[in-house]
Image (cartoon, grey):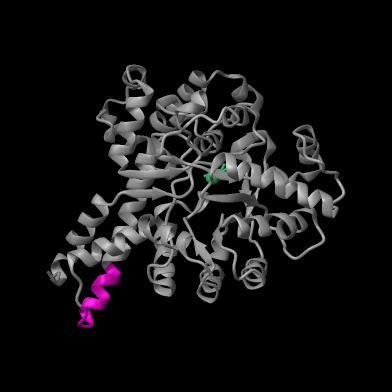
Amino acid sequence: MNIRKEDVSKAVKKAIDEVQIIDLHTHIFDLRFKDLLLWGIDDLLTYHYLIAEVMRFSDMPYDEFWKMTKTEQANFIWKKLFIENSPISEAARGVVTVLKSVGLDPAIRDLESYRKFFASKKVDEYVDLVFKIAKIKYVIMTNDPFVEDERKIWIKNEKGDARFKSALRIDPLLVKWSSSYLKLKEWGYNVEEKLTEKTFSEIKRFLVDWIDRMNPVYMAASLPPEFKVPADTETALIIENAIIPVSYERNVPFAMMIGAKRLSNPQLKLAGDSVGKADINTIEYMARMYPHNKFLITMLSKENQHELVVAARKFRNIHIFGCWWFLNNPSVVDEITRERMEMLGLSFTPQHSDARVLDQLIYKWDHSKKVIEKVLTDKYSDILEDGWTVTDDEIKRDVEKLFGGEFEEFLKRKF
Ligand code: FIX
Ligand code: ZN
C-alpha cells in the first residue's frame, strides 16, 4: 500500500528496525579464535578510541598507562570519562548504549556490578545475544595471515561459524615488503626482496593458497594518505602485478581503505593513528585500467568524500562502503550519507561497524541506523512531495539494499 506523507518516518523506522544487517568490515572473530574475540565491559572500556580520549584528561606518563592491567586501565577510563566527565563523545556514549541494550542500568554507574553481569555470561550465548540485539545476519572479519595467533588457527582448517565470513587482510605484503618477504620465504614461497617476475608469481601463489584456505569475501588493505598507483614503489608494483590479477582470476574484490596515517603518536600505540587526505587519481586510475576488477573503497579523510562519490558515479566497478573510523560520528555520517544518496541513489553501503569488541556491534549499528533513518526519511519525503509514491515493500527493499543487499549484488555482477 502507498505510504502517506505523514507515515513515511514510521515506515522507514520499521524497515530499519527489522533489517538483518550484513556488516562489511569488523575486527571481531568467531569462537575458533578464542581470546582474539574481545567482549564485555573491560574490553569495551579499553577500546583504543577511549584510550586516546582518556589521555587528554590526564598527565600520566604513557608508559605508566601501558603498564597497568586491563582491569586497571578500564577503572581509570571509567573514572575519567564516565564519572569525572559525562560520556558524551561518540565512543563513550557507545558504552552507555551497550549497557542499556543488554539490560543493565547505566544510571547506577556501578562498574563492579556490570563486571559481574559479564562474568556470568557464556561467550557462545553472548555472541547469539549480541547478534540478536544488533540484528546481524553476518559480519565480515579482518583476517591477517601474518598475525601468528590467527595463522595457527587458520592452518587447522576447522569449520567456522557461518555468521562470521572472512576477509584476507594483506597490509604487510603491501606496506612492509622488506620484512614480509622473509616470512613468505619461511613459509615456502620462493620470493626475493627484489620484485622479479618469479617473486610476483610466488606472491600470487601465496594469495591463492590463502584464498583457498579462508574463502574470503574480499582481500583488503589499509593504505596511507600518500598511497599512489601507478608508481615505482613496492606497494604499487605488488598491487598491479599480483593483487589485481589474482583478484580478477578468483573474483575476489580488492578493498582499499585509504587515508590512515599509522602511529602519528607512537606513544599511544594502536590509539595513535591519524588521518590524511589521499589522492583520488589513484582510485580512478585503477578503476579505469582494470574495468573487469571490483574495488571496495572507503576513505578516511572527510575531504576525500565528495570526489570519492564522483569517482563511483564514473566507475561501476567501485563500491563505496562505510563511514570509517573518525568519520563514524553522527554529524559526519549524516552529511556523507546524504551526499552519497544524492549522487548514487541506493548503490552503495552507508555503513560498516569496524567493531573490535563484539558488544560494539550493538552501539555502532544503533547509532548509525538512527542517522540513516533520518536521511532516508527526508529523501522519501522529498519525492512524495513531488507526487511520487512508495509502498512498505519498496521501503523494505531499499533498506535491505543499503544494509548489505546492494553489496551482495555487486559481488555477483560480472564486469
Ligand atoms: O585498518 C583498519 O581496519 C582500521 O579500521 C583499524 O585498524 C582501526 O584501528 C580502527 O579500529 C578503526 O575503527
Ligand atoms: Zn578496521
Which quadrant is home to the N terminus? bottom left
Which quadrant is home to the C terminus? bottom right
Image location of residue 58, percent across then percent down: 56, 31
Image location of residue 399, percent across then percent down: 30, 60
Q: Does the magenta segment cover residue 92?
A: no
Q: Nearer the viewer, residue 306 or 268?
A: 306
Badge count: 0
Image location of residue 34, percent across then percent down: 49, 24
The residue lying at 57 percent from left, 58 percent from top is 301
Up-down relation of residue 160 to residue 207 (above or below): above
Identify the magenta region.
378-388
The residue lying at 23 percent from left, 72 percent from top is 381
Q: Does the magenta segment cover residue 385?
A: yes
Q: Is residue 202 shown left or right of residue 374?
A: right
Chief secondary structure of the magenta portion:
helix
Q: Quadrant of residue 276?
A: bottom right
Image location of residue 66, percent across then percent down: 61, 24
Up-down relation of residue 243 to residue 345 (above or below): above
The residue lying at 24 percent from left, 64 percent from top is 395
